[in-house]
């Protein structure tokens, strides 16, 4: 084995990356192995990391190994906290304990935080990440309407029409029309506020609704994005975009 290890044909780079190595093997060749790769690619126990704490790469340990909170606490001065904040699953009690060490930008994006916890640390959290990644109720959003990032809410959260109606002057209608599914009654109510190109492209419209607003809709997007019957196409043959109709017909025919 030693002769094999010493031979030039033995590719340590591939071995450390792709081969699961026993702890005894790593221990035996501790002065030959690349500890950065060991720390990144090998599954290491906390006892093993503890044994070789002066050899392991703590950034990769913090990023790639699964660590308990007790272990992180024990090695709080060795772990890399931005990696801990991003890659380890942390309890709110633990985050509270190490609130001055964690990176709140990553906390807001990668950790699952309760509304009570966000409320407690409303100054520390990153509201962009919080608005995008955390599960926020409409009541909570109303409470922190001046802190949440509205475009993130509109893009990544399903909002009720009553909520949109209440904050119609605060929400960005561009994202509402692109990311929220709206009823035809709601679109009808806000027909002078909505962007009809976006309506035609992103909202699911009935033929009766398109007929009602035939002078507002964008027929190229209606032709490209809405499901139209043959009778409807025939009725609006001078309005529809025949290039799109023909293209979609060919796709359907050859599917």
Image (cartoon, rainbow, N blue to C red):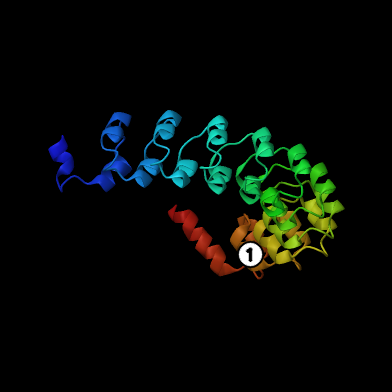
Towards the viewer: 93 or 241? 93
Judge by depth and name the residue closer to the eye, 30 or 130: 30
Seen in the picture, residue 147 relative to 64 is either above or below; the reply is below
Label 1 sits on a secondary structure element that is: helix
Instruction: Give the number of marks.
Output: 1
Residue sitting at 80 percent across and 48 percent down? 161
Q: In this picture, is 239 found above or below 154?
A: below
Residue drawn 52% across and 46% down? 80
Q: Position of residue 116 (x, y in %)?
A: 77, 37
Q: Nearer the viewer, residue 140 or 41?
A: 41
Relative placement, left or right, of 40 versus 14 is right
Any part of residue 204 in sight = no
Outermost residue, right side: 166
The spot of residue 57 in percent (x, y) is 42, 45
Tell me which corner region of the image, top left, top right, bottom left or bottom right, holds residue 70: top right
Above or below 67: residue 212: below
* Quarter assignment of residue 31: top left
Q: Position of residue 239 (x, y in %)?
A: 66, 69
Dot 1: few (<14), some (14–19), or many (≥20) neighbours within 10 Å? some
Q: Residue at x 15, y 39 (%)?
A: 4
> Which residue matches tag 1?
221
Quarter that holds the N terminus: top left
Q: Is residue 127 left or right of residue 242?
A: right
Residue 237: x and y, percent?
64, 67
């Amino acid at each position: 084995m030693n002769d094999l290890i010493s031979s030039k044909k033995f590719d340590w780079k591939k071995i450390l990356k792709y081969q699961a190595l026993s702890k005894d093997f790593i221990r035996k060749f501790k002065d030959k192995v690349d500890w950065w790769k060991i720390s990144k690619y090998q599954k290491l126990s906390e006892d093993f990391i503890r044994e070789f704490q002066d050899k392991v790469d703590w950034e990769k340990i913090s990023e790639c190994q699964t660590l308990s909170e007790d272990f992180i606490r024990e090695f709080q001065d060795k772990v890399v906290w931005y990696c801990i904040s991003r890659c380890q699953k942390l309890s709110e009690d633990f985050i509270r304990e190490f609130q001055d060490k964690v990176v709140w930008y990553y906390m807001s994006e990668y950790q699952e935080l309760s509304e009570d916890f966000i409320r407690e640390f409303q100054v520390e959290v990153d509201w962009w990440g919080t608005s995008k990644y955390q599960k926020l109720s409409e009541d909570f959003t109303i409470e922190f309407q001046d802190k949440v990032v509205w475009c993130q809410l509109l893009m990544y959260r399903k909002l009720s029409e009553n909520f949109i109606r209440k904050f119609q002057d605060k929400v960005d209608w561009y994202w509402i029309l692109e990311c929220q599914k709206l009823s035809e009654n709601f679109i009808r109510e806000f027909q002078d506020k909505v962007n009809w190109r976006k309506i035609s492209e992103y909202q699911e419209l009935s033929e009766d609704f398109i007929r009602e607003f035939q002078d507002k809709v964008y027929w190229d997007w209606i032709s490209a994005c809405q499901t139209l019957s043959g009778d409807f196409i025939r009725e609006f043959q001078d309005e529809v975009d025949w290039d799109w109709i023909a293209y979609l017909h060919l796709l359907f025919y050859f599917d």
